[in-house]
Image (spheres, grey):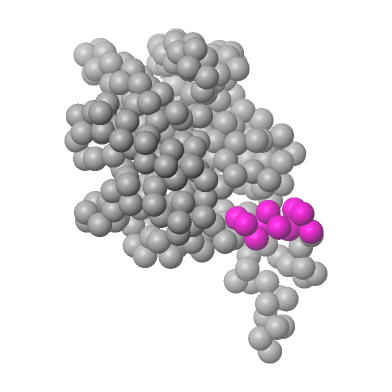
Amino acid sequence: MTNISIASFSFHGAVADGTLDVFGYLEACRYRYHLDTADIWNGLLGSDVEVQLNEDRLRKVRKAMDERNLTCVNYHADGCHPWEADAEVRAKHHDLAQRHLTAAEILGAKTVRIDTGGADRFWTDEQFDFIAQAFIAFAERAGNGGYKVGPETHWGATNYPDNMLKLHAAVNSEHYGILLHLGKDTWTSADDYDRALAPIAIHTHVDQRTCYERIDASLAILAEAGYTGALGVEHHSGKNEFAEVEAQIGLVRRSQSHTRSGRPQGYQGNPLLDPANERAHN
């Protein structure tokens, strides 16, 4: 059965108010949620890039993971996407991306997410060629390091399957894939969106809407595509995060049990609307 992880952005509210740091997150993953995975967003490592990427501190984080028998299934890095209109910014982002890849390697990440840049529906030819070449180089480094790298279906052009499939073909590396944020509404349907992109996914984000409205469909689509990565539960509200994450994990685990043993008769996919539950309380 596919592993579950917690995208650490799920706790961005607690990180922002100073009540959670990376070491508390690792403790929660292992002993509160009983996982053997870590799923680290660079913002969890500190608000300052120099703190985030300090190699001595990263080695302490890696030691803390090893002590808890946690594997870093994904490292997601903000602020280092290849494309920006300003050439000087592109150069800075290139250097920062290399530092983030070093961080991922220290942490032993199995996959790495770096966004592409490009906020419009389509990339221009110049943007596309620049982004493709950047990810070809990232994928080469990833291959040498034994991990995979790619962008998330996250913002701008990356929200559309046609763009992501075109980029996947251009990079053409077994060490490249995408972080699939499941169920986006930018395609003909959420199911069609997932079905188009699941074959090239190396990691996932499973948000609240997916968990509560269509988790069985999403997991079935991933299984049909032969997906073997982790199911990265992600919460976005910034409030009541520990309980909300626990609820989402429970729904993913429930759906996994449906795969093993089948769904209750009358089950409609949303536990809040399940007629079997309604009958049980009448």
Relative to residue 123, is residue 208 depicted above or below? Answer: below
Count of numbered circles in the view = 0
Q: Principal SS element in the magenta part?
A: helix
Q: Position of residue 204 (x, y in %)?
A: 54, 40
Which segment did they paint magenta? 252-261
Q: Is residue 252 visible?
A: yes
- In the image, taking residue 139 as reference, residue 86 lies left or right, namely left
**Residue at (40%, 30%) from the top-left corner?**
107
Q: Nearer the viewer, residue 95 or 269?
A: 95
In the displayed orientation, state which residue is furthest to the bottom: 282
Relative to residue 124, is residue 189 depicted above or below? Answer: below
Q: Is residue 90 visible?
A: no
Q: Position of residue 144 (x, y in %)?
A: 49, 12
**Residue at (30%, 35%) from the top-left corner?**
60
Q: State which quadrant residue 66 falls in.
A: top left
Q: Position of residue 10 (x, y in %)?
A: 40, 51
Relative to residue 11, is residue 145 depicted above or below? Answer: above
Quadrant of the drawing holding the N terminus: top right
Quadrant of the drawing holding the C terminus: bottom right
- In the image, taking residue 117 as reference, residue 281 lies left or right, namely right
Relative to residue 17, is residue 282 depicted above or below? Answer: below
- In the image, taking residue 179 as reference, residue 237 lies left or right, namely left
- In the image, taking residue 183 as reference, residue 149 lies left or right, namely left
In the displayed orientation, state which residue is furthest to the front: 67
Q: State which quadrant residue 68 falls in.
A: top left
Q: Position of residue 64 (x, y in %)?
A: 37, 41
**Residue at (36%, 31%) from the top-left corner?**
77
* Residue 255 drawn in magenta: yes
**Residue at (59%, 13%) from the top-left corner?**
172
Q: Nearer the viewer, residue 270 or 256?
A: 256
